[in-house]
């Protein structure tokens, strides 16, 4: 019997929710029910599936007043920011809007003798393993297009956001999505791995740590089940000498600190042209000094606790090591900093790539800022990472920025913006950030498989 899943609130360390996990037999039964229901779901007209999914999305929106404080209690995001429904709805709506075109048959040719075309068919049962940092938006990235494409979905959510999957399942079921087509499941790691190894599912989408991604790939080894992963990140920003300095500071520091730095594509290192470096640091420090660290249920709080004490401990360790190796800290300890989950956001200068804070994923409210003299130096430093999710370039010259972008090893390049997911673009990464592609037309391609039809007509 495995241990129950327990969500500890970062607000005060109290137990917020406990859920029992499914046994291996119970998990397999859930997957079998999903498989049995999937064919009937896929046979429904596309427009009907879209309508039901979007009704489920709207039902989640109707819960938002309850969801916002619930998220604060589970993972610490301040209530003043209003939750995730805007992005949740935007992503689902976009995927619904392109579904007919993305899933349409691809004509190859027809004459008096043959009809030939390629059809996108659902993979079957999709297992979505979602993270806690943006628990609704990251889940909907796959849940909406998977269901629209005709798959059944098993959603396994992170322990830190234990109630999110329940909320989503309740909403989608109330809207008419069949219970067995979309199931929230509570699973431990071993049972999850066994489901994959036994081919009880047909596709895995995992967002989480590099170690977790490796575990998913090991479980799938030899099964030929596709595993799409979005893992760690160490996303850079580069501010060129012709950049709009105020816009660059405002956006990059927000990208580094929002959600207590716990963003998949948050900014974790910044390279600034030497002519702007000192002014950039001065403005950045002023912004962060204006934050209010505190209880996320208080509307005055602008930065809440990290989601768990152990996450804050890793960030503190990286900061302390950097300071011991010669870095300079610019933010004095804030009153609410308790040495636990409540952590003072920090800006570091005099950093080098020998320091872990510039090399390992921090996933917390700390950013290192380095001075650079040229595009070549900036590109070398941006690529000096085992991760590759996004990079943010700040410049007035579009052609120059595009030339730099072509040289960066990353999944997405932003110019004059950061920390945003455009559902029209493929969400993907490289190196230890993982592989796969979500959202956009490519998201549909990955959640379906091509099936070719070569039909010879009977002629007299």
Image: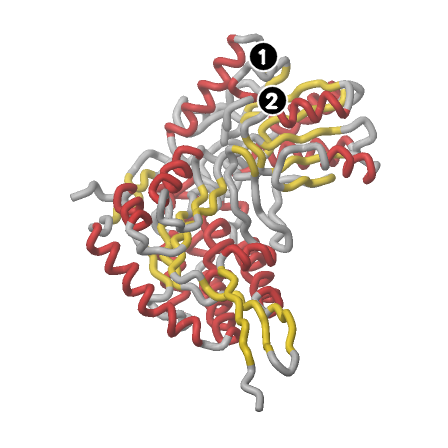
- Classify mark 2: residues with Cα within 10 Å, few (<14), some (14-19) or many (20+): many
Looking at the picture, tell me which residue is in the foreground, 358 or 376: 376
Residue at image position (61%, 28%) is 288
**Where in the figure is residue 37, as x and y percent of width and height?**
34, 69
Looking at the picture, tell me which residue is in the foreground, 11 or 372: 372
Q: For mark 2, give the secondary structure.
A: strand
The label number, if any, that marks residue 53 in the structure image: none
Residue 247, visible in the rendered structure: yes
Check the image and name the residue furthest to the front.
460
Against 45, residue 302 (above or below) is above
Q: Which residue is mark 1?
A: 327
**Where in the figure is residue 392, as x and y percent of width and height?**
68, 36
Check the image and name the residue furthest to the bottom.
460
- Classify mark 1: residues with Cα within 10 Å, few (<14), some (14-19) or many (20+): some
Q: Which residue is mark 2?
A: 368
- For the residues bearing labels 2 and 1, Cβ distance under 8 angstroms: yes
Against 16, residue 345 (above or below) is above
**104 horizontally vs 21: left or right:** right
Residue 338, visible in the rendered structure: no
Looking at the picture, tell me which residue is in the foreground, 375 or 257: 375
């Amino acid at each position: 019997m495995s241990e129950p899943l327990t969500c500890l609130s970062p607000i005060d360390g109290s137990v917020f929710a406990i859920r029992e996990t499914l046994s291996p037999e119970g998990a397999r039964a859930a997957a079998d029910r999903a498989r049995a229901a999937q064919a009937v779901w896929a046979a429904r007209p596309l427009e009907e599936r879209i309508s039901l999914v979007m009704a489920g999305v709207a039902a989640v929106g109707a819960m938002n007043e309850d969801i916002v404080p619930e998220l604060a209690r589970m993972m610490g995001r301040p209530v003043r920011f209003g939750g995730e429904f805007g992005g949740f709805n935007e992503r689902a709506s976009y995927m619904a809007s392109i579904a007919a075109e993305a899933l349409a048959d691809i004509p190859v040719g027809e004459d008096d003798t043959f009809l030939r075309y390629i059809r996108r068919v659902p993979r079957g049962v999709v297992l979505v393993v979602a993270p806690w940092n943006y628990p609704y938006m990251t889940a909907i990235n796959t849940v909406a297009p998977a269901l629209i494409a005709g798959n059944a979905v098993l959603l396994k959510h992170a322990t830190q956001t234990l109630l999110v999957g329940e909320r989503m399942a309740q909403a989608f079921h109330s809207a008419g999505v069949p219970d067995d087509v979309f199931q929230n499941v509570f699973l431990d790691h071993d049972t999850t791995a066994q489901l994959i190894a036994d081919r009880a599912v047909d596709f895995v989408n995992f967002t989480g740590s590099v170690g977790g991604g490796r575990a998913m790939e090991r479980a799938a080894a030899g099964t030929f089940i596709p595993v799409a992963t979005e893992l760690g990140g160490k996303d850079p920003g580069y501010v060129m000498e012709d950049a709009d300095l105020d816009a660059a500071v405002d956006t990059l520091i927000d990208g580094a600190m929002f959600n207590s730095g716990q963003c998949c594509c948050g900014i974790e290192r910044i390279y600034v042209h030497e002519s702007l470096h000192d002014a950039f640091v001065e403005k950045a420090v002023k912004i962060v000094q204006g934050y209010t660290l505190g209880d996320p249920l208080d509307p005055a709080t602008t930065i809440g606790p990290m989601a768990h004490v152990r996450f804050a401990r890793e960030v503190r360790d990286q900061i302390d090591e950097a300071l011991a190796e010669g870095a300079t800290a610019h933010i004095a300890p804030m009153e609410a900093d308790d040495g636990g989950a409540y952590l003072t956001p920090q800006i570091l200068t005099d950093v080098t790539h020998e320091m872990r804070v510039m090399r390992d994923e921090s996933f917390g409210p700390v950013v290192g800022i380095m001075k650079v003299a040229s595009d070549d130096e900036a590109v070398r430093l941006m690529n000096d990472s085992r991760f590759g999710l996004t990079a943010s370039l700040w410049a007035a010259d579009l052609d120059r920025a595009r030339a730099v972008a072509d040289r960066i090893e990353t999944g997405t390049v932003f110019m004059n913006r950061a920390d945003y997911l455009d559902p029209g673009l493929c969400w993907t990464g490289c190196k230890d950030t993982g592989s796969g592609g979500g959202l956009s037309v490519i998201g549909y391609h990955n959640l379906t498989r091509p099936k070719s039809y070569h039909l010879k007509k009977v002629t007299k």
